[in-house]
Image (spheres, rainbow, N blue to C red):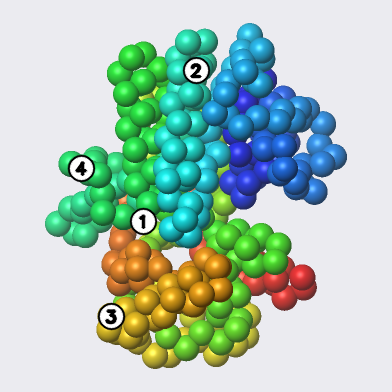
């Protein structure tokens, strides 16, 4: 039986679906208040366990039948009020699972992020060999993933068989424009500005597929970037706009204007007790040109990633018919 944390989440639910379609039995962890996705409600081989992860008691009784662990659960928030809770949960949940897997000699795959990578080669590409020399100056979420990954490496040094994956921005259809669907919502609503930065993007189906293949390959004690394509934000927004048949952003935003925007967003959020739509970190990162080298995972698995432009069309059609 395979243990999956964060099974009701965007990536976790896709991973469960692929494992179940392969005939695997899955022990899925979720918070008591989490809603089970419809895509998983009628598939055989799935056992749900209510667990906070911060206590291993809810799933430790299953240790004798668990053969693999996929750690997808993480708290994600852009509200500064959640920073301490997010840091605590992401680090401690990873530590508890790593201890559980080491004690019971169970291999583990940990979902990290490209936010934990720091640096680039002379061609401007970042690969798996770039480790930050200190805590990175990133959004608190990125920092929590960096410190969580450090926990995995600590337990690897103690004998844990673990794989770390560092996905770039994961795309996929999520109802009501949630998650990465926010990109489609802001374009549909008539976004006028774009920034000169760029990033890596990958389909959620490809991330889950790579995770399963890496476990099958027993590629332990390694980290792997999972990235389909490196695309400028201008090109990315244009692709979404074309797929939705709306006008693409046409005005290049400067740092000064974006600085005013995140400060105004912070003020509005404070006065209305809501989450800022633009933060200092997201504004700053929107000017970064990040390019990720995926050759390590491609060479090992021989995978051919889904075209991001074609995938955008698929997602857009679902939102159009929503």
Q: Residue at x 71, y 62 (%)?
A: 175
Q: Nearer the N terminus, badge 3 or badge 1?
A: 1
Report the mark closest to the observer, 3 or 2: 3
Give the numbered dot on residue 139: 1
SS for dot 1: loop
Q: Nearer the N terminus, badge 1 or badge 4?
A: 4
Q: Position of residue 97 (x, y in %)?
A: 50, 24
SS for dot 3: helix
**Which quadrant would residue 162 be assigned to in this image?**
top left
Q: Position of residue 23 (x, y in %)?
A: 73, 28
Label 4 sits on residue: 134
Distance CA(mark 4)–CA(mark 3):
27 Å
Give the numbered dot on residue 255: 3
Residue 264 vs 135, above or below: the answer is below
Residue 75 vs 240, above or below: the answer is above
291 relative to 90 in the view: left or right: left
């Amino acid at each position: 039986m395979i243990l999956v944390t964060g099974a009701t989440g965007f990536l976790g639910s896709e991973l469960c679906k692929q494992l179940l379609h392969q005939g695997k039995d899955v022990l899925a962890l979720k918070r008591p208040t989490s809603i089970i996705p419809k895509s998983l409600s009628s598939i055989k081989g799935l056992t749900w366990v209510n667990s906070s992860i911060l206590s291993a008691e809810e799933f430790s009784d299953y240790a004798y039948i668990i053969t693999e662990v996929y750690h997808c659960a993480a708290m994600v928030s852009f509200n500064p009020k959640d920073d301490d809770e997010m840091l605590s949960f992401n680090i401690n949940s990873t530590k508890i699972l790593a201890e559980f897997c080491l004690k019971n000699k169970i291999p583990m795959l940990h979902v990290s992020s490209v936010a934990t990578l720091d640096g680039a080669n002379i061609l401007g590409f970042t690969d798996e060999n770039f480790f930050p020399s200190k805590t990175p100056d990133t959004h608190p979420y990125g920092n929590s993933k960096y410190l969580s990954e450090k926990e995995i490496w600590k337990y690897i040094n103690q004998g844990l068989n673990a794989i770390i994956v560092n996905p770039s921005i994961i795309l996929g259809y999520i109802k009501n424009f949630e998650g990465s669907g926010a990109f489609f919502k802001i374009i549909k609503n008539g976004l006028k500005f774009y920034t000169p930065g760029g990033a890596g993007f990958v389909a959620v189906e490809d991330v889950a597929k790579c995770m399963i293949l890496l476990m099958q390959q027993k590629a332990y004690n390694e980290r792997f970037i999972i990235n389909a394509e490196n695309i400028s934000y201008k090109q990315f927004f244009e692709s979404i706009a074309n797929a939705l048949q709306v006008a693409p952003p046409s005005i290049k935003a400067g740092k000064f204007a974006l600085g005013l925007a995140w400060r105004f967003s912070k003020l509005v959020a404070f006065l209305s007790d809501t989450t800022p739509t633009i933060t200092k970190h997201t504004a700053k990162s929107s000017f970064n040109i990040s390019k990720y080298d995926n050759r390590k995972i491609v060479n090992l698995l021989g995978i051919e990633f889904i075209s991001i432009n074609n995938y955008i069309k698929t997602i857009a059609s679902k939102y159009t018919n929503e």
